[in-house]
Amino acid sequence: MDTNAPDKKPLRAVDFKKPETLRKKYRTVSGDDSPMSAYTLIGQLGLVVVLCIVGALGIGIYLDRLVGSKGPFTFVMLLIGIVAAAVSAWQLLKREVPWNR
């Protein structure tokens, strides 16, 4: 054994009978309630929605041109992009917003 190694701290025991405070239990991931964090969240939501929809539309248009059709791939990919944007936005909101204050 290495005697020069620093001592490891013992694990702290968890007291399950002691209730957590609501602030600690339901705080946001970043822990910041400033207006700037709200602007950041809005920007992230906008970016997620735009990238999902525009990316899916680009793929749909490319597939339509590749096959020579006039729109079915674009329509299907638009629907997929909207669903992907909704799911991604929901996941982002679920992670960042404290729902049960």
Image (cartoon, rainbow, N blue to C red):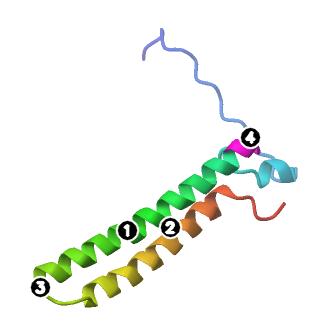
List the residue tagged with mark 1.
54
**Placement of 35 over or under 84, stated as above or below:** above
Of labels 3 and 2, the one closer to you: 3
The disc label shown at residue 13, or none: 4
Does residue 31 appear in the picture of this structure? Answer: no
Task: Look at 41% across and 67% down and name the residue there.
Answer: 52
What distance separates the C-alpha of mark 4 from that of mark 2?
37 Å
Task: Look at 48% across and 71% down and name the residue there.
Answer: 85
In this picture, which residue range is highlighted in magenta?
Answer: 31-36
List the residue tagged with mark 2.
88
The disc label shown at residue 67, or none: 3
What distance separates the C-alpha of mark 3 from that of mark 2?
30 Å
Looking at the image, tell me whether mark 3 or mark 2 is earlier in sequence order.
3
- Name the residue at the top extreme: 4
Marks 4 & 3, CB-CB < 8 Å contact? no
Callout 1 secondary element: helix
Does residue 11 appear in the picture of this structure? Answer: yes
Looking at the image, tell me whether mark 1 or mark 2 is earlier in sequence order.
1
Of labels 4 and 2, the one closer to you: 2
Q: Amino acid at mark 1?
A: Val
Magenta segment main secondary structure? loop
In reply to whether residue 21 is colored magenta, the answer given is: no
Q: How would you rate the neighbour count of disc 2 (Cα within 10 Å): few for under 14, some for 14-19, many for 20 or more?
A: some
Can you give x and y, in whole percent of width and height, for residue 13 in the image? 74, 40
